[in-house]
Image: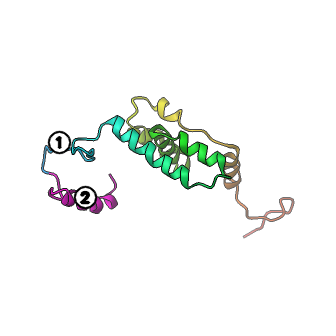
Amino acid sequence: MPSTCLPALHTYRRLRGLPAEPPPGERLPLIHSERSRALGASGLYDEVRAVFALAAMRVPIADGAMRAALEAASTHWLRHGYARTLVVDHRVPLPVAQTLLGHASVQTTAAYVHTDISQLRAFVEGSFAKERSDPLSPPRTK
């Protein structure tokens, strides 16, 4: 967890009546259900889907594609977006992303990466110096 998240986590723990820092070996759940038990995987999935459904309702009806995307979104969609952001947008090395995502194989992590033509173009354009405005003019001497 990034250190910038720790103040919010400490505040959350204090509001739940816990010490800001967990004692060694603490096994309390971080997220609780309405019944004060640990929120399981299916409960978390349901909560995420509910947030996406609320977001979809706030999108203008004219933007049907975005509404449909949000209505179909899931926790896996978030995971895929996180993986893509790590590897494509932030160029995190695959072995690092593999560890962060908990994949047993780097090939699993690599499967999340899809490069589109605009990313390829940006890479190619950024790979060449733009020193000369006229590519046919002779190089400048220093």
- Per the rendered image, the range of residues in magenta is 1-22
Residue 11 lies, in percent from the top left, at 24, 62
Q: Residues within 10 Å of mark 1 (few under 14, many from 20)?
A: few
Residue 86 lies, in percent from the top left, at 48, 47
Q: Is residue 70 left or right of residue 44?
A: right
Residue 22 lies, in percent from the top left, at 16, 52
Q: Is residue 120 left or right of residue 30?
A: right
Q: Give the labeled residue for mark 2.
A: 12
The quarter of the rendered structure image containing the C terminus is bottom right
Q: Give the labeled residue for mark 1.
A: 27
Helix, strand or loop under label 2? helix
Q: Earlier in the sequence, mark 1 or mark 2?
A: 2
Q: Residue at x 47, y 43 (%)?
A: 78
Residue type, numbered disc 1: Arg
Q: Is residue 18 above or below residue 39?
A: below
Front-lying residue, 19 or 91: 19
Front-lying residue, 133 or 68: 68
